[in-house]
Amino acid sequence: MDISQDFFSCYGLSRDFAIDLDGLRQAHRHLQQQHHPDRFVSQPDSDQRQAVQITAYLNQAYATLIEPLKRGIYLLQLHGMDPLVPTNTSMPLDFLLQQIEQQERLEDMHQAQDPETEMDTMAFELQTQASQLETEFAQAYSSAQFEAAETAVRKLQFIVKLQQQLNTLEGVLLD
């Protein structure tokens, strides 16, 4: 296996945002079984090291491709863009205001009459926003509108962060 190839090629997938996740899972299992270091225990050290390197590469590739945000970032990086550059802070004002509102709502969640229902509602809203941004990214990317795709993935990063914060809060409030 050539670990210098891009992650999509390694799994036989086209370089696109919309990928067959079940196909990715199956290909990953197959390649993991084929290159698992335990299969090379009786082989020379160089083969064992190579198996470890390939396994690490496969794990990184899978973790990147299975998550929409990471997959979007990776696709942009393949086009020479880096949406995570700290100096790239321009975002539409309405989106930033919405993020501030959602952050405040999250911070006040513990004071809600019914925090569990409020968390479920917010989780649904965030998932809806994430799905819309994934669609927005996919359309922009497939149309070679990379700046629009970059904006969509940066917005998605905000939503994913809020989802993670909500999950953490849910664990604290409901335990």
Image (spheres, rainbow, N blue to C red):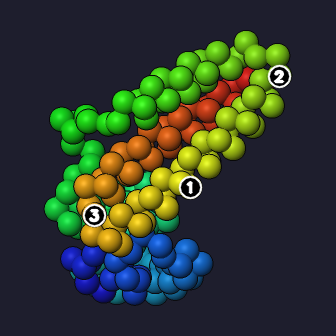
Q: Is residue 33 above or below residue 18?
A: below
Q: Of callouts 2 and 3, which one flags the residue occurring earlier in the amino acid sequence?
A: 2
Q: Nearer the viewer, residue 128 or 166?
A: 128
Residue reaching furthest to the front: 94
Residue 124 pos. (x, y %): 69, 44
The percent coordinates of residue 84 (x first, y second) are 27, 45
Find the distance from the CA under tag 2 to the CA under tag 3.
43 Å
Q: Is residue 112 visible?
A: yes
The residue singled out by tag 2 in the image is: 114
Alpha-carbon neighbours of circle 3 within 10 Å: few (<14), some, or many (≥20)? few
- Looking at the rendered structure, the number of numbered marks drawn on it comes to 3
Query: Quick one: label 1, few (<14), some, or many (20+) residues within 10 Å?
Result: some
Q: Amino acid at mark 2?
A: Asp
Q: Nearer the viewer, mark 2 or mark 3?
A: 3
Name the residue beneath numbered marker 3. Answer: 145
Q: Name the foreground residue: 94 vs 12.
A: 94
The relative height of residue 103 versus residue 5 in the rendered view (above or below) is: above
Taking the view exactly as shown, the residue that stands out farthest to the top is 111
- Earlier residue among tags 1 and 3: 1
At label 1, which amino acid type do we have?
A: Ser
Rendered view: 15 above or below 93 = below
Mark 1 to mark 3 CA distance (whole Å): 19 Å
Does label 2 or label 1 sit earlier along the sequence? 2
In which image quadrant can residue 50 be found?
Answer: bottom left
Displayed quadrant of residue 78: bottom left
Left or right of 135, for residue 87: left
**What SS does tag 1 mark?**
helix
Q: Residue at x 42, y 66 (%)?
A: 138
Residue type at the position of mark 3: Gln
Q: Is residue 71 visible?
A: no
- The numbered dot on residue 131 is 1
Q: Residue at x 22, y 52 (%)?
A: 82
